Image (cartoon, rainbow, N blue to C red):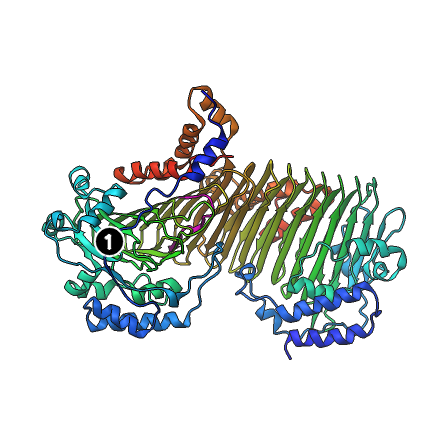
């Protein structure tokens, strides 16, 4: 039985547990129909030209993990940002772990999507926002059909959240292969500020496929800072779709750090609905072995006087594959716009591949749009300069790679997180520089 | 003096009819509409082709039947009904002319209206013109001068008869029959085109040139061009096109193959000014062209194009950099106005070591047109030290048009160096103000700025073409700033 058929029949079983008349139920029914018609994306689709899921789909994934998995704190402590206090939403094999989490309802809501979907007091918010910005493509629809658990974050007007919120999804590997479909809903009210750190981590070498969907709504003058850390084990694959809907004068920044995993596909979509929005999309990708990361970004400008900045850096070793497929779409009303897109890549080994497709679609005349893409090597003169001053070859290389990725690293606003990412990069490059950069 | 406002400009542009919109009544021999194996055989027979050519066409036709028309390009149009087109039309009086005096005076009139007086060109420019009118070559000049050097420059049907060994060896070697839908169609039904062979070590002393015209109502134009530059030779080839006004859309599906052997250099320049449709977007030519060149060791192919015409353009002149140290270049200006749509760009496929490619593309969109750049830069695993530089700039005039960029960059070698940059902007009010203030009126100022914007590409055109191209740019864009 193919995975598609399995999912379709699982849905029928899943549907039995649902309330009959909720509007969400209709949503699910429609979503599963979309998935049934479209199926999993193939390389024939332009958006998936460089990434094939075929190898992943052959696994016999269990859709609903059976056994209740338990995880000891000491087992996973290293994945938390323990130097600072944070709110935590921890899910183990898709099930909420109250023991590892720290939620709140004190003036802000940091809790579970399952309770938000079921409790009447959240009904208004769910009706106003749930599945409103997500694109109805096949994988997102699949997630919508099965969505039952994930983070629910609602920051009301004028509220500045004092500590970052961590969303962590663990998979234990109790099953041979597991398919997880977390669904997050983040609503940030007028003038509110929030920082979010998201991570997917598998604790064994068993296969995991995560099809995550996150919806972020930034109301007027809201500020959202989001960090995605992708440093998973080599059998873990991730399709992470994030949809950001921005209102007037809001600022949204999403940083993606891709260091691990087998196949990672990031669909990052920004919709600027109001004037003077600012969107920032940054990423550092450092890959080795046979890893494959595909960044698919869209910034859809619909209103005037907005800005968007994209900056993706990639370093590719061994036979890793990097894909960047960025699109800036400017509607004819989005005048006086500044939109920039930058994608720089370093190929370290001969078998590594980079496919880059930075696109512009522009229907407004009074705009400044540019994109740049480079593929190259570390500067030999710079290497020589460093080596002539007594810095070893390996360290010199690492130093230059740091410098290459630095713009993006500098934009991380949580110092503890920055230190953590620094360490991850040092690990990945295989050196310890012994000083902070 | 009343002020010459932008509205006036707009009005003038809108009322400006296609200058080359006339129709010459020459008794044409036209095949019945539709396409099947018999028609393909008939075309081949009509052209007195050898057996292998007929077979080659039929093979292409069979591939074509299995193919579907591509729709990935960023253009929207009503697909032509391929069974409603006549696939062959040739001027029926087809004597072999010794001099221009013998040419049908009506035909000469056509060329005069186009401003390509043969005599004048002969005298002034030293250009040998192989004129193609509705697919059949009617006049070839300077043949003797070229023959002295051993250069073969003739129609492709003549080449099939006289130099079958060359044609057989190279036709379809760069663009195979099954390459794509339109290439397959062209391979099956091509009516005529140009053939050019430059022998070893010869530098072609003059610019070779062909003018294409679509003339007969309801006939497709299927050109086939084959240029072979043997080792160490050089040739500069010019191609220019205009088509008269017609209400229904006309189809043009050409194939151009360039072969640059070791150390050879081919420079291929195009000025395309097919009828773009009127200001309501009615009529105009569908231009679906496959152009590709292959570079052997140390060879160089340079494409330069100025695209101002056609209702729909679908064209990607490409270079396969097969040999080590070979060079590919692509310089393009694409102008779209009113309802024109263009999806054009290039492919640079790096296979050999130390290969280099440069892409400069300038898109100008005005009116309600859509202009897309679509390009591929592919560095293969064995292409060490490959180098590419791409620059795509777009200029938008008014907020009803669109500019799109779809670059594909694929690198599989760590020594590759690829740079791509693209910008989009409009003509600044301050720039125009600056010119106005110095006594240059708005229209001139726009021409000036557009010329400056496209200068990098215009500079690459041969002298005679550059002047014409500049004029074309001005005509296509007059008054389109809003």
Residue at horizontal 79 percent and vertical 73 percent from the top = A15
Residue A179, quarter of picture? bottom right
In the rendered view, does A106 fall on the left or right side of A178?
right
Residue A163, quarter of picture? top right
Q: Position of residue A34 (x, y in %)?
A: 67, 67
User: Tag 1, which secondary structure?
Assistant: strand
Give the mark count: 1
- Eyeballing the image, is B267 above or below A123? above
Write down the residue under mark 1: B132
Give the quarter of the figure containing the N terminus of chain B: top left
Q: Is residue B337 magenta?
A: yes
In the rendered view, does B194 fall on the left or right side of A101?
left
Q: Does the rendering let one see residue A39?
A: no
Q: Residues within 10 Å of mark 1 (few under 14, many from 20)?
A: many
Span colored in magenta: B334-352
Q: Does the rendering let one see residue A433?
A: yes
- Eyeballing the image, is B358 above or below B187? above
Q: Position of residue A228 (x, y in %)?
A: 69, 52
In the rendered view, does B13 fall on the left or right side of B223?
right
User: Is A422 or A304 nearer to us in this picture?
Assistant: A304
Residue at horizontal 76 percent and vertical 72 percent from the top = A65
Q: Residue furthest bottom?
A: A1
The chain that hosts pointer 1 is: B
């Amino acid at each position: 039985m193919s995975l598609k058929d399995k999912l379709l029949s699982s849905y029928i079983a899943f549907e039995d547990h649902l309330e009959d008349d909720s509007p969400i139920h209709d949503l699910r029914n429609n979503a599963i129909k979309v998935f049934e018609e479209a199926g999993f994306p193939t390389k024939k689709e332009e958006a998936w030209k460089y990434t094939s899921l075929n190898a992943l789909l052959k696994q016999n994934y269990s859709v609903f993990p059976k056994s209740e998995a338990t995880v000891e704190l000491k087992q996973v402590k290293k994945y938390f940002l323990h130097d600072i206090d944070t709110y935590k939403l921890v899910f183990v094999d898709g099930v909420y772990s109250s023991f590892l989490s720290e939620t709140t309802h004190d003036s802000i809501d940091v809790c579970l999507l399952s309770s938000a979907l079921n409790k009447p007091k959240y009904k208004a918010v769910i009706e106003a926002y749930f599945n409103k910005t997500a694109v109805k493509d096949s994988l997102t629809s699949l997630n919508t059909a099965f969505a039952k658990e994930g983070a629910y974050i609602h920051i009301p007007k004028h509220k500045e959240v004092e500590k970052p919120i961590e969303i962590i999804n663990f998979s234990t590997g109790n099953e041979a292969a597991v398919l997880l479909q977390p669904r997050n809903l983040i609503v940030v009210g007028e003038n509110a500020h929030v920082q979010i750190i998201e991570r997917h981590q598998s604790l064994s070498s068993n296969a995991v496929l995560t099809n995550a969907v996150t919806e972020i709504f930034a109301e007027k003058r809201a500020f959202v800072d989001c960090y995605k850390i992708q440093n998973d084990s080599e059998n873990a694959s991730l399709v992470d779709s994030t949809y950001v809907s921005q209102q007037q004068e809001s600022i949204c920044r999403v940083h993606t750090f891709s260091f691990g995993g087998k196949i990672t596909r990031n669909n990052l979509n920004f919709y600027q609905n109001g004037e003077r929005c600012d969107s920032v999309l940054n990423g550092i990708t450092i890959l080795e072995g046979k890893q494959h990361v595909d960044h698919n970004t869209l910034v859809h400008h619909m209103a005037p006087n907005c800005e968007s900045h994209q900056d993706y850096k990639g370093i590719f070793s061994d036979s890793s594959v990097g894909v960047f497929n960025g699109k800036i779409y400017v509607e004819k009303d989005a005048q006086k716009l500044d939109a920039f897109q930058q994608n720089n890549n370093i190929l370290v080994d001969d078998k590594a591949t980079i496919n880059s497709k930075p696109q512009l679609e522009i229907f407004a005349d009074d705009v400044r749009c540019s994109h740049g893409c480079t593929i190259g090597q570390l500067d030999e003169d710079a290497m020589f300069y460093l080596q002539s001053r007594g810095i070893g070859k390996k360290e010199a290389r690492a130093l230059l790679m740091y410098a290459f990725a630095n713009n993006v690293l500098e934009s991380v606003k949580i110092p503890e997180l920055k230190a953590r990412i620094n360490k991850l990069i040092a690990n990945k490059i295989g050196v310890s520089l012994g000083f902070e950069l | 003096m009343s002020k010459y406002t932008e509205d006036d400009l707009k009005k003038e542009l809108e009322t400006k009819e296609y200058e080359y919109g006339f129709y010459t009544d020459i008794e044409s021999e036209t095949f019945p509409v539709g396409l099947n194996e018999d028609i393909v055989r008939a075309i081949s027979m009509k052209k007195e082709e050898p057996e292998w050519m007929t077979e080659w066409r039929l093979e292409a036709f069979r591939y074509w039947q299995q193919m579907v028309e591509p729709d990935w390009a960023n253009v929207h149009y009503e697909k032509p009904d391929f069974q409603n087109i006549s696939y062959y039309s040739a001027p029926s009086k087809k004597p072999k002319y010794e001099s221009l005096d013998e040419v049908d005076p009506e035909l000469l009139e056509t060329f005069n209206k186009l401003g390509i007086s043969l005599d004048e060109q002969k005298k002034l420019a030293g250009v040998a013109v192989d004129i193609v009118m509705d697919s059949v070559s009617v006049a070839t000049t300077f043949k003797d001068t070229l023959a002295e050097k051993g250069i073969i420059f003739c129609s492709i049907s003549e080449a099939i008869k006289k130099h079958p060994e060359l044609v057989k060896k190279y036709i379809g070697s760069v663009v195979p029959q099954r390459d794509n839908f339109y290439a397959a169609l062209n391979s099956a039904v091509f009516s005529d085109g140009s053939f050019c062979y430059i022998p070893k070590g010869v530098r072609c002393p003059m610019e070779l040139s062909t003018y294409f015209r679509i003339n007969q109502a309801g006939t497709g134009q299927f050109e086939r061009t084959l240029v072979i530059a043997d080792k160490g030779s050089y040739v500069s080839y010019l191609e220019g096109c205009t088509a008269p006004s017609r209400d229904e859309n006309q189809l043009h599906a050409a194939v151009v193959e360039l072969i640059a052997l070791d150390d050879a250099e081919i420079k291929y320049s195009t000025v395309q000014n097919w009828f773009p449709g009127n200001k309501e977007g009615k009529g105009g030519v569908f231009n679906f062209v496959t152009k590709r060149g292959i570079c052997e060791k140390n060879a160089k192919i340079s494409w330069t194009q100025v695209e101002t015409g056609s209702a729909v353009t679908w064209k990607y002149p490409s270079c396969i950099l097969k040999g080590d140290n070979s060079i590919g270049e692509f310089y393009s200006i694409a102008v779209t106005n009113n309802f024109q749509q263009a999806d054009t760009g290039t492919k640079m496929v790096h296979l050999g070591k130390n290969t280099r490619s440069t892409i400069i593309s300038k898109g100008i969109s005005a009116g309600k047109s859509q202009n897309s750049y679509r390009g591929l830069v592919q560095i293969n695993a064995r292409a060490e030290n490959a180098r590419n530089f791409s620059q795509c700039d777009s200029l938008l005039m008014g907020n009803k048009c669109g500019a799109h960029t779809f670059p594909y960059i694929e690198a599989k070698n760590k020594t590759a160096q690829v740079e791509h940059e693209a910008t989009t902007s409009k003509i600044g009010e301050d720039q125009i103000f600056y010119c106005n203030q110095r006594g240059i009126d708005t229209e001139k100022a726009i021409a000036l700025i557009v010329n400056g914007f496209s200068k990098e590409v215009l500079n690459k055109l041969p002298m005679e073409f550059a002047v014409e191209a500049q004029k074309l740019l001005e005509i296509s864009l007059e008054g389109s700033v809003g």
